[in-house]
Image (cartoon, rainbow, N blue to C red):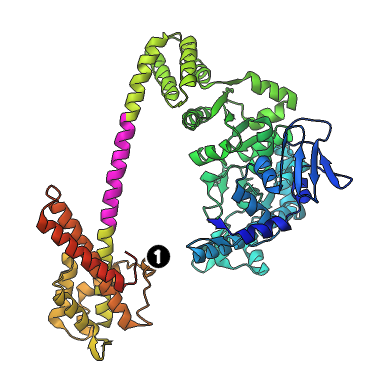
Amino acid sequence: MIISKENRKKILSASCIEDVIGHFVKLRKSGMNYRGLSPFSNEKTPSLIVSPTKKIWKDFSSGKGGDVISFLMEHENFSYVESLHYLANKYNIRIEEKNNNDHYHEVYHQICKKLYLIQDYAKSIFIKQLFLTEEGKKNGLNYLIRKRKFDMKSIRKFELGYASYSWNFFTKNALDKGFKIQDIEKTGLTIIKKDNYFDSFRKRIMFPIHDLSGRVVGFGGRTIVDPSNFTYTKYINSSESFLFQKSKILYGLFQSKKYIVKENFCYLVEGYTDVISFHQNGIKNVVSSSGISLTIDQILLIKKFTKNVILFYDGDISGMKASFRVINMMLEKEMNIRILFLNNEEDPDSLSRKYSMSQLKDFLVKNSYNFISYKKKIYDKLYQKKYDPIKKSFLISNILNSISKIKNILQKELFLQEASRILNVKQEILNSELERIMKKNIKEKFIVEKNEKTYNLFSEEKKKENILIILEKKLIKFISFYGNKIIKKGKNETTVFQELLHFFKNFNLRFYLKKNQEIFDNILSKNVKKKETSDSNVINVIENEKYYSLSKWEKKGIEVPSHKENIDQYIVDLLLRYQSQYILKLIQEEIIKHNKNIENKSFIKRIMYLTNMKNKIHKKLHRYV
């Protein structure tokens, strides 16, 4: 996707460098320039200079400098295109992108724009409900301040809100504001059932989830009702939408990214409140996986800012199991990981409230371990250091399996040495076992990939077969309803039924499914009006089968007129598409039949003939071959 040169000039000329940098750094006027503390180093004397006239900046403490784009790339870890999008959004400039799918992107852009507006409106509604309604103050604010010990600064910083108990308070307000119900539903904030609608979030603390630019893309809602006594889910997230994909977003990353870059490491916790508690305690390089199992996309998102992660999950059994899974994923993506070892009753939220910032930092340093020491500690905790050769062999295999994920040869060797020391096992033996595990992993990976390829080929074959069957059902349905409809054929007139019969006889075709051929034969034998042709078999097909809409074909690049609009063209297109799929099926059958003798001249001649026929049909359908 390319942003035009004219568009880039427009964005850059509209951008005010002191305004952009001033959003991230406190600037003070100094003659014709601005000064501020370096965001890239710890300093007490301002060394960052911003020149509005030259539209450049220079940080003398780190030696970095450039224009507004380079600042965003350095400070926010944006790509060049992401920086342009950020500036365009900030100054309300529409980006015109060069792409073969211009119309698609235009539609997509318009949908996203509407959804962003609705999400932002929802955020404001939830904030008002928290601070300005009796229900919000009593249930929401009281919970956040008294139970969670959040101060007003943290509540406002993370833009927390409250969703009322009303069934449709938000949706009704959004409709009154002028938003359309279909667009509101796309955000996942509203559920529509039959002719009724109601809010997805009710009687919950609302946590807005931001993207890297700070726009709200979704919400997390925490019930204030005790989930042990009611059938309430403790936390729910927005449903998947154009904007919100849980597996690709990290809660708190927008608020934490500059601190992650500054510290060059990141705390990874499980929940929303863990992130807020850490920030309130002065530790701001922290993100959460929003209550879902960590994904590869989320790891790569962290990697944009740092390769160093301290995993801080709960100290219970489920937290331990989750940490084991995350360790291997992190190592595979060449991340440097340390893990907090906690007692059962400890979690990030409780610890951040228990200790001051300096005490908490000291606790985190003393209780974080590399994955080998961490797994050994869990083993000792579970088995109280009782020696059991079988259990210990499982521990060793588990540790070696993690080491096998490391790609860096030097690191792998050093971790083997560490494992030998901690486990008190000779390194030669560990080396031998590691080689066995790696060979096994390669073999399993090969089998998985082979199975995936086989499955994909099978799926593709089934998909093509299904298209043929779908078209047969369409033809049966069409002649059942419109068999006696008069259509034009050149200067002459004929009926839909006669046209279909002529087509099948002319090309010597039969329906692929035996059931469909029997129905067609039944209609052929009667060849009477629609009323008389609607026997039980035909009715069964029409009423019980799910027919696919023509939009499926339009997505494939075939323009299909509605049969209500142009029945003559509709039947011609339908028959051409059927013939095309029928020929494809014949080609596949020929290839399977002669798979061991593909150099046979008659086979090649047959394939060329069928392919030529297929190409001619595609041209009639205005498709590129």
Q: How crowded is mark 1: few (under 14 residues within 10 Å), some or many (20 or more)?
A: few
- Decide: is 342 above or below 238: above
Choose between 499 and 490: the one closer to the eye. 490
Q: Could you tell me the amino acid type at mark 1?
A: Lys
Choose between 194 and 295: the one closer to the eye. 295
Q: What stretch is highlighted in magenta?
A: 443-463
Q: Position of residue 417 (x, y in %)?
A: 47, 13
Choose between 137 and 250: the one closer to the eye. 250
Q: Which residue is rendered at x = 69% and y = 33% of the image?
A: 262
The total number of labels drawn is 1
- Decide: is 443 above or below 419: below
Kindly indicate the quadrant of the structure image that contains residue 581: bottom left
Q: Which residue is rendered at x = 16% and y = 57% of the image?
A: 589
Look at the image and say whether residue 152 sits in the magenta stretch. Answer: no
Q: Position of residue 46 (x, y in %)?
A: 83, 35
Q: Residue tagged by mark 1?
A: 555
